[in-house]
Image: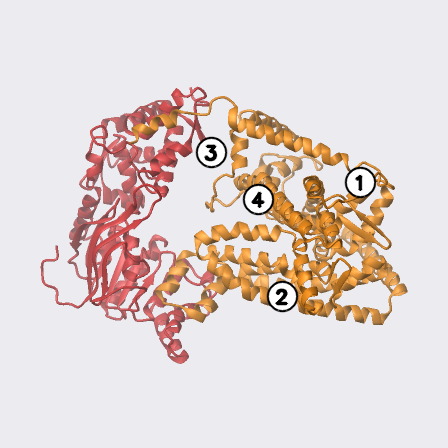
């Protein structure tokens, strides 16, 4: 029987043909699309159609393209930010003193609240041009993507294995060479993963940032987000469905075309020598690796990158033998003084700004609203956990189901939940439900999936021998949940819950206020307060709301999630 | 084989057991074939075999963790349907819950049975003291060394007072000294009658360990796993490894395990079996030349006793036998009744310089390993001298499990690269003739 199979082995791919044809088409398609999308950004706002959106579904491909380009522009900005900010934080002790905590706070600030002001700012930079609006939208997306990417790079740079670092020094690699030859490759897997997460997070902001209202003015940039906003205004549920479909296709496309190949490619930079779960190469990566025409092109690119990375650039000259050089006390003191001065100035600015327009009773009121939103977040986290932990465990322990559920959950997490608001709003209006209670679930609509897919991953990674031990000692029922599986998945659960709760705070600004045509539903809470102030263009109130919300998020993280995460890492991990 | 009538009560009885995993499309993958096992009270029995011989699978079938594809398993006369109450298991990887302290880990099995707290604590403390863990009750597994962790594993199993203690390669993750201490401690407890179990069934691939500890040894052959031989070890405890009779039993088992399997004696051309149906273990060229050099040198001068060689190299059977078999496959050495000796070709290889060695290796490789030959042929025939590894792997998977197929391919890639017969691009998963000649 093997003899009959020899011919199949001998028959190879002749000449460029199929793979090349597919690749060629893809490349040309992407170039054309890119050019077309870029055209639209340079026209004046006054030109008809520049900032108008039509509900005709035939426009959706173009809108989807514009939106996607915005996403990638923001991604490029985020990468630039990551490589400068993250590197600076990792390389300079004094810079890290400021940069790391700032990044930590930035992660918790609900940027959505600032949308109004960034729009005004960018509009003034490019008066009368669509570009200003575009940049404002891109900036909003950027703020949702950049922080965790920068953190990822920072953490990788901080944990480069000492032996590799020493090897690099002993071969006289310059700082520049070391960065590109050792540190960046080491950071790649984490960075790729975080980029993927960022991309998912960005969608939420796309939808919010394409249609902006500042005081009396309102702009709609052509895109899926503004299409949805218009559909909501016009009460057109069919258009919402079209938008959802378009979004699904876009997410599917970049997932298949970009991120699957990237993740597979990045696995070669993984430092652990233990073989992880190696999935089959995604088709795009196979395409790139197998095509005859793309390969030389890729190699030329690789060679160019290798040349750049190999340049003997150095700021500090040849690396010297590591000696415990004591940091200068004087410079440290001067640096500290500068920081204190800046801090004092910032506090003074914020206080004076807010105190002019806001009274103490207002502050009390806002804190109270913050507590209401906090209550919502806590209740939602508990409910989501009660629902998704058992389901996640059930799925995770069955490899076949886990494999099916995992991509689906990741996909759902990437899907901008604000697109799914309309049905909820309709239901609330129709049944005359209380917005205070029933708008609440919208906050976790998009974020609950983080809990699910982390729990699935945790349960799937639960060691087989522990499962067998539990079965052998016939541990069942509640005892099994308490002593076996919950501690086992806890580190994963915490990771998911942190992401989910952070996302829910941000979602509050969008979820506590919802409208359907003229009907406006509003719940009591900090999110609604910020959204309201934004609509009215009341800057002082927005600042107050955002500051209070940031404080809540930071405190929530510090007092609850950090300790739990630390405990999980200390006590519950297997290593 | 068991001719004498044994009146001791029978604990577990396995009859005609077969375990197969379903493979898509092609035939099932048979791990165990027609295995019979009877275990009575008062004996320690070893399942001895190479990795992949299905002995751990049998252990899981006995424990009720796994249901055999065919055959009957009875526990004290009643059919086994799930994890049995009177059976406790000790794992190779210890399988301790990292979030529970030593005390909590040990108590867990009792808690599952609903033993009240005070009783639980009393029994756990007794087990912890017996196994030499006193003072470590509050420690977490992370804080303990491997030896101490396995003691926790033992205490956890013993505290439930199982009739049958199952041990899955319990000492193979430990260093030599720690393993020996644990073995003797366990045997001492057994001999003193302080071990609260009626019988012990252990899986091992360490021949000396089996002879040192067990009353009865079942030697498994692989592919599919069967009981190839059963023998009794008649010595009283404590046993002396250097004792002549002890050495003889070890030698005998080496002889049994190196006996040629029927598949290999068949000439590849005459048999209808595909030339690809030849799983190759992960054996590198460095270790092959290393062993040949060692054999050629003093004190072996071309011939060595396998147990002695294993002892001096600190190799386990699992390391040494595949290595010896691969040398035999390539015609560099011969395995005979527990001995290995170098052939003329082997001596020539040892005497050669790097380039000549590669040449010899390339020749013998093309002669004896059909897969290598086939890859090279395909590469020669193609216009671009490239071929996907995937196709070869799929071919291999028609004849063996995916794991074996992956191992075989990996081994062949290593050998082919060393012999400079072909090169391999890991990212594209392609063989090619780049940089060859």
- Mark in the foreground, 2 or 3: 2
Please determine if labels 2 and 3 lie on a single subunit.
no
Where does the image place residue A175, in percent across and percent down from the top left?
A: 66, 37
- Identify the chain of the residue marked 3, using the numbered disc in the image: B
Q: Are marks 2 and 3 in contact (CB under 8 Å)?
A: no
Q: Name the residue: 64% across, 67% down.
A: A378
Which residue in the protein does label 1 denote? A49
Identify whether A351 is placed above or below A324: below
Q: CA distance from mark 2 to mark 3?
A: 47 Å
Q: Residue A145 has which mark?
A: none
Horizontally, residue B295 falls left or right of residue A408, namely left
Which residue in the protein does label 4 denote? A189
Callout 2: few (<14), some (14-19), or many (20+) C-alpha neighbours within 10 Å? many
Please determine if labels 4 and 2 lie on a single subunit.
yes
How many numbered marks, from 0 up? 4
Q: CA distance from mark 4 to mark 2?
A: 32 Å
Label located before the other in sequence (4 or 2):
4
Of residues A125 and B347, the one drawn nearer to the viewer in this rendering:
A125
Chain B, chosen colour in render: red
- Mark in the foreground, 2 or 1: 1
Q: Residue B426 has which mark?
A: 3
- Identify the chain of the residue marked 4, using the numbered disc in the image: A
Chain A, chosen colour in render: orange
Where does the image place residue A277, in percent across and percent down from the top left?
A: 47, 46
Q: Residue A380 has which mark?
A: 2
């Amino acid at each position: 029987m093997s003899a009959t199979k020899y011919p199949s082995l001998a028959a190879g791919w002749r000449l460029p043909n199929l793979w090349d044809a597919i690749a060629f088409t893809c490349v040309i398609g992407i170039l054309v699309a890119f050019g077309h999308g870029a055209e639209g950004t340079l026209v004046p706002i006054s030109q008809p159609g520049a900032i108008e959106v039509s509900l005709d579904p035939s426009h959706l491909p173009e809108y989807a393209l514009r939106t996607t380009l915005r996403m990638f522009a923001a991604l490029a900005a985020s990468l630039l930010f990551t490589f400068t900010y993250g590197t600076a934080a990792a390389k300079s002790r004094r810079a890290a003193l400021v940069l790391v905590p700032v990044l930590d706070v930035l992660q918790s600030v609900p940027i959505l609240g600032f949308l109004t002001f960034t729009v005004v700012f960018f509009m003034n930079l490019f008066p009368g041009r669509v570009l200003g609006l575009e940049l404002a939208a891109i900036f909003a997306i950027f703020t949702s993507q950049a922080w965790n990417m920068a953190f990822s790079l920072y953490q990788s740079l901080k944990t480069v294995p000492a032996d590799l670092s020493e090897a690099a020094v002993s071969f006289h690699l310059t700082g520049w060479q070391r960065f590109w030859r050792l540190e960046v490759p080491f950071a790649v897997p984490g960075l790729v993963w975080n980029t993927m997460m960022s991309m998912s997070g960005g969608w939420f902001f796309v939808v919010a940032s394409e249609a902006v209202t500042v005081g009396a003015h309102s702009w709609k940039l052509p895109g899926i987000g503004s299409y949805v906003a218009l559909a909501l205004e016009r009460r057109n549920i069919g258009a919402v469905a079209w938008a959802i479909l378009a979004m699904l296709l876009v997410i599917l496309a970049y997932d298949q075309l970009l991120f699957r190949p990237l993740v597979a490619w990045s696995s070669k930079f993984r430092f652990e020598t233990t073989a992880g779960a190696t999935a089959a190469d995604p088709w795009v990566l196979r395409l790139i690796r197998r095509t005859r025409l793309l390969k030389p092109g890729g190699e030329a690119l690789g060679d160019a990158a290798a040349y750049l990375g190999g340049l003997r650039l150095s700021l500090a000259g040849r690396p010297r033998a590591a000696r415990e050089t004591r940091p200068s006390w004087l410079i440290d003191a001067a640096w500290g003084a500068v920081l204190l001065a800046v801090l004092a100035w910032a506090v003074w600015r914020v206080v004076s700004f807010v105190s002019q327009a806001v009274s103490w009773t207002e502050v009390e009121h806002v804190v109270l609203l913050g507590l209401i939103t906090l209550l919502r977040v806590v209740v939602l986290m508990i409910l989501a956990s009660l629902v998704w932990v058992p389901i996640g465990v059930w799925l995770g322990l069955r490899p076949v189901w886990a494999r099916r559920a995992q991509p689906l959950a990741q996909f759902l997490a990437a899907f901008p939940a604000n697109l799914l608001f309309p049905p909820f709003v309709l239901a609330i209006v129709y049944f005359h439900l209380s917005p205070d209670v029933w708008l609440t679930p919208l906050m976790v609509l998009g974020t609950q999936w983080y809990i699910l897919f982390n729990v699935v991953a945790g349960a799937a990674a639960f060691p087989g021998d522990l499962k067998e031990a539990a079965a052998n000692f016939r541990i069942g029922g509640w005892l099994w949940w308490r002593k076996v599986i919950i501690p086992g998945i806890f580190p994963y659960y915490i990771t998911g819950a942190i992401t989910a709760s952070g996302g829910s705070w941000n979602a509050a600004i969008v979820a506590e206020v919802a409208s359907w045509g003229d009907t406006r539903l509003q719940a009591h809470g900090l999110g609604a307060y910020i959204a309201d102030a934004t609509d009215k263009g009341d800057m002082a109130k927005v600042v107050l709301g955002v500051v209070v919300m940031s404080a809540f998020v930071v405190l929530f993280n510090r007092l609850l999630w950090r300790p739990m995460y630390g405990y999980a890492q200390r006590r519950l991990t297997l290593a | 084989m068991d001719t004498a009538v044994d009146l001791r009560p029978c604990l577990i009885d396995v009859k005609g057991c077969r375990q197969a995993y379903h493979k898509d499309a092609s035939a099932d993958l048979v791990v165990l074939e027609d295995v019979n096992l009877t275990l009575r009270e008062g004996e320690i029995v070893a399942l001895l075999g190479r990795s992949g011989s299905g002995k751990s699978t049998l252990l899981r079938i006995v424990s009720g963790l796994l249901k055999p594809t065919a055959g009957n398993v009875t526990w004290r006369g009643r059919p086994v349907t799930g994890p049995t109450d009177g059976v406790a298991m000790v794992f190779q990887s210890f399988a301790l819950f990292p979030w529970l302290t030593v005390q909590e880990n040990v108590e867990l099995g009792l808690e599952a049975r609903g033993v009240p707290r005070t009783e639980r604590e009393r029994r756990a403390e007794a087990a912890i003291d017996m196994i030499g863990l006193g003072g470590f009750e509050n420690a977490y597994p992370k804080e303990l060394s491997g030896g101490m962790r396995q003691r926790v594993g033992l205490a956890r199993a013993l505290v439930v007072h199982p009739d049958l203690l199952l041990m899955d390669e319990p000492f193979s993750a430990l260093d030599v000294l720690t393993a020996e201490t644990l073995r003797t401690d366990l045997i001492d407890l057994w001999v003193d009658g302080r071990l609260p179990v009626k019988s012990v069934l252990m899986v091992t691939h360490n021949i000396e360990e089996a002879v040192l500890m067990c009353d009865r040894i079942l030697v498994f052959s692989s592919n599919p796993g069967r009981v190839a031989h059963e023998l009794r070890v008649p010595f009283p405890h404590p046993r002396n490894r250097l004792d002549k009779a002890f050495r003889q039993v070890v030698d005998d088992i080496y002889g049994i395990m190196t006996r040629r399997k029927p598949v290999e004696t068949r000439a590849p051309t005459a048999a209808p079996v595909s030339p690809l149906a030849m799983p190759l273990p992960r054996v590198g060229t460095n270790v092959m030349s290393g062993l040949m050099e060692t054999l050629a040198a003093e004190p072996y001068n071309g011939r060595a006793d396998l147990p002695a060689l294993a002892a001096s190299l600190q190799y386990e059977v699992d390391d040494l036998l595949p290595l010896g078999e691969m040398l035999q496959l390539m015609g560099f050495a011969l395995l005979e009744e527990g001995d290995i000796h170098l052939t003329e070709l082997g001596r020539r290889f040892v005497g050669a310089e790097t380039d000549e060695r590669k040449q010899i290796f390339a020749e013998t490789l093309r002669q004896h390993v059909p897969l290598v030959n086939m890859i090279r042929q395909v590469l020669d025939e193609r216009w671009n001298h490239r071929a996907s590894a995937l196709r070869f792997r799929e071919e291999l998977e028609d004849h063996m499990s995916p794991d074996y197929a992956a191992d075989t391919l990996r081994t062949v890639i290593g050998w082919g690269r060393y012999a400079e017969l072909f090169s391999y691009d890991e990212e594209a998963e392609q063989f090619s003739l780049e940089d060859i000649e």
